[in-house]
Every structure is written in structure tokens, then in C-alpha cells.
Amino acid sequence: MSATRPETTARRPQPSASLCLVSGELQPNSVVDGMTVERKIGEGAMASLYLVRSDAGEPLVIKVPCHSLQADPVSLVAFENELRLAPYLQEFPYAYMPRIRREGSGDYLVMDYIQGVDLWSYLKEHGCLAELEAIALAKKIVRATAELHKRRIVHLDLKLSNVMITPAREVRLIDFGLANHLDLPDLIHESFREPKGTPAYIAPEQFIGIRDEPRSDIFSVGTMLFEMTTGKLPFPDAQTPLDVIRRIKRAPCSPCRLNPALSSRFEALVLRCLAANPEDRFATMDALYRELDNWAPPETPTSRGVERESWMRRLTRLPSRWTEGLLSRTDHFTPLRRWAENRCASAARPFRMMAALALRGDRHQEAVNVEILRQAFQMARLRPSFVSVMTVVQVDVGMASGEKADEILNEHLIKARRALALLVGKVEKHGTPFGINVVTGNVVDAVREFANDYRIDLVVIGCRPRRSFPGFGQGRTGQKILASVKRSVLAVQTRDATVAS
């Protein structure tokens, strides 16, 4: 009699987590650092979101960056920024408490799973909110943002889709990719000269390079209050840079024009939040919270007084609409620029250096680049300094256009960013703050504009002996840089260095 072999269930080998992270895709039932993947719950230009379970069965979310060379460079930098801010948000109860984990292919985020829906989806399903309901919800958003500001972080991308509403009607803030920690170098500003964010929500000062102003979030709260109660945006046509300039130059529409049931006090609060000049808004989030906390429900008129109040409201609206028409023609942009210039002039700032590198691909050029970085970071350790590491790429997209041309450009920009990061990693070991910038266009023009825009104090370029290479050096390009850049310039060789002003 032969023994019967017990039945065995063959288990499919689980995918390697590191291979999954490299490819950017995680398969269901794969295991990453002890967490079992259930399904993908979101995907964007920056990263993919997966619902996972810990060993204890706790639902978590992991955020895996996109590794494609066709990805938007802004999205990749935003993910780097979110990784950098994660340690400051781990104990923040109004967010998803991110933790950084490392796999073979790089870092990723592990976050609390927030049950509920974003505010945009909630309003799409339930419609506009009544005044008191909007005030109650805004109080929670403002309280969360006030706590964020106490941690020295400005969100800078508050909007309906970045606010989660839990089943218990609590508020959670999400997406800190564009946020700025006021005690750290601003990675977004240092990487991109043009403003980033949703044009209809971000504050006017963000469009002129101010990203360290906490009152910018107050402007976004005003925009959300406007949208929650009217279903419209105060500046619906602000989609292009020219539209944004027009937006700043005129006053916002009154929410009462779109929803006459709103009180005049609500109108005044929203318009104060939406003031073009930060000095005209609430001084702090705490001040805005106190105003919301003291909100009294509007008096309910008697049935006889309803018709009378309706006529009175119409009559009182006429002068305000006439005044609003005049104010909408007032130029708010010029005073805002003046405010920004005075603010920048009085603000203390570190000594700024620009290390201009040429990515030519040969060993000698790499040695020159390493020497540029070595001397720049060595000088940066002698005084409080910030080093901007930049290069200029010239991309020929050929006959490509539209999305294909953008893909080709993004591929070159991402390759250049990674090459600069590798070079910096070989030299910088002391924690000196630095930024990585990749720009396109003419080399001389790009260096000059960069030095002016970022108020660079010292430009460091490289040169070979006998003027034997093009690009950043003492050839015709180097001479043009020396002649056009109105800054001190340090020209570096691999064995020698000379200073020119």
C-alpha cells in the first residue's frame, strides 16, 4: 500500500519589491518592507499611490515616485520636496503623517490611510454649502493650517482637492509637494524660476517669486470659501500668466453677486482674504480663526420682513456694485510689486553662489565640474551661504511638437538633474544648503538671467588650459559671461584658479 502524499498548495512567488519600485508598478499581493500591497488607489504625474496592509493589518498608503524619463520635472522635484518635509510632518495630526522608507531603487513614502473624500468631490456630490456650514468647515481648515504654520511650514497649494473630509467630518491636509519650510532652502523656488501651483488658488505674491509668506495660505482659504458657497471661482479665467497679471490688477467678484443669501459680513471676510496685498489680509491664521470662531448666525427675518429685506438688499447692493466696478479697474499689481521689493530689500539673506557646470560627458570636463563644486562648497563653509548648482541644456526636438516635444525636453531635463545630483554627491559631505537648476536656451543669456533673478553674489565657472573647450570657460562663451554678468566671477581650472570681477 503506497502512502498518499498530502496535497500542497503551490504559492506564486511574490514579486521583488525593489524590482517593482524600479519599474514604478507594484502588483497585488507583493510585499514591500513587510507591507502587503492590496491595490493601486491613485496615479499622477509625480507618483503612484498604493493601499497596503502592515503585518498588524493596519491600512497604510505608500507613495512610489515615477522613474520615467518622460515624467514632468516639476513633479519629480515636488516629490523630492515632499520627502524632505516628511520628518516635520510625522507627528502632525492634520495630515497623513508620512514616513520615509528606502528600497533598492530609492526613497518612497509610507502614509496613514485617510478614509473619506476630498472637498472638491464632496461639493460635486452635495452642491454648495450654506454660509454657516462653510464657516464651520473653514474653521477646521484654518485650525489645521495654523498648526502647520506653527511648524514653520507654508502649504502654498491649498485647494478643494487637497483637503480631505473624513467620515467624522474632520479635516486632513494633503499634497505637500509645493510647500515651503521657512527654515530650509526652498527647493521649488531654487529649481524653477516660474511660479508653481494652481493659478486660480495661489496668492498674487507667489507669481512674483514670494514663497515664504504665510498669508499666502489665507488667500487660498478665501478662494475655497468663495467656491464652497457659490460653486464658482473668484478668478475663473486665471489660467495663463497673462490672465494672472490681469487677475492681480483687478478686484475679485463679490460672492454675494453669485449667492445673494450670503451675509455682508461673510462678503467682507472673503474679500479681505482675497486682498492682492498680503498686508490687507488677516495678519495670521490665528486671527482668521478668531474671526470665524466668533461667527454668529444671521438673524432670520419675519415673513413680513422678507420682502422688505429683499428690496433693501437690492438697494444697498447697487452702490457696492458701482464701487466694485471702480475698484476692479484699480491697478493692484504695482503696489504689490512695491511691497515685494521692500520686503526683499529688508530681508536678511545668505551669501549666494552659482556653480555653473557644463555636462559634456568627457573625463576632463567632469574633473573641471568637480573642481568648480569643490571650491564653491569650500567657500560656502566659510560663511552662511547657499550654492545654486546649475547647467544649461540645449535641446533639439526636431520635427516633434506638442506632447512629443515636451517628452523629449523633459527627458533631457531629468537626465541633467540626475547628473548634477551625482556630481554634488561626490563633493558635498557637510550639509551645505544647495539647489539644483537646469535651464534651457543660450548659455550666456541663461547664466546672466539666472544670476539676476536669484540675486547671485558670486558666479563660479570652469575653464580648461589653452581655452580648449566650449561652454562655460575662458573661450568666447566664457568671455561673454565675464562681460555680461554684473557679478563677481571666479574662473576655475583643475590645477589653478583666477578671479575676475
Image: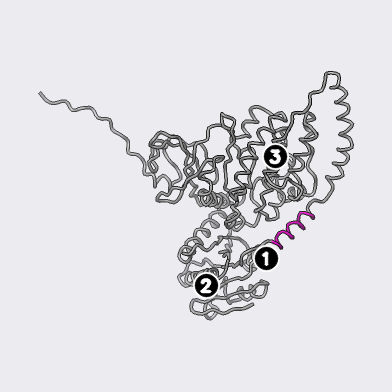
Residue 114's disc number: none
Residue closest to the eye, 455 or 485? 455
**Residue 433 at x, y percent in the picture:** 54, 61
Label located before the other in sequence (2 or 3): 3
Q: CA distance from mark 1 to mark 3?
A: 42 Å
Q: Going by the image, does 482 lie left or right of 380? A: right
| Residue farthest along the bottom direction in this orientation | 466
Amino acid identity at mark 2? Gln
In the picture of the structure, the residue carrying the numbered disc 2 is 375
Q: Residue at x 41, y 44 (%)?
A: 20
Badge 3 is on which residue? 290
* Residue 273 sits in quarter: top right
Between circles 1 and 3, the one closer to the viewer is: 3
Q: Quadrant of residue 221?
A: top right
Q: Is residue 261 magenta?
A: no
Q: Are marks 1 and 3 in contact (CB under 8 Å)?
A: no
**Residue 487 at x, y = what percent?**
65, 72
How far across and down, in percent of the image, does residue 367 sit?
47, 71
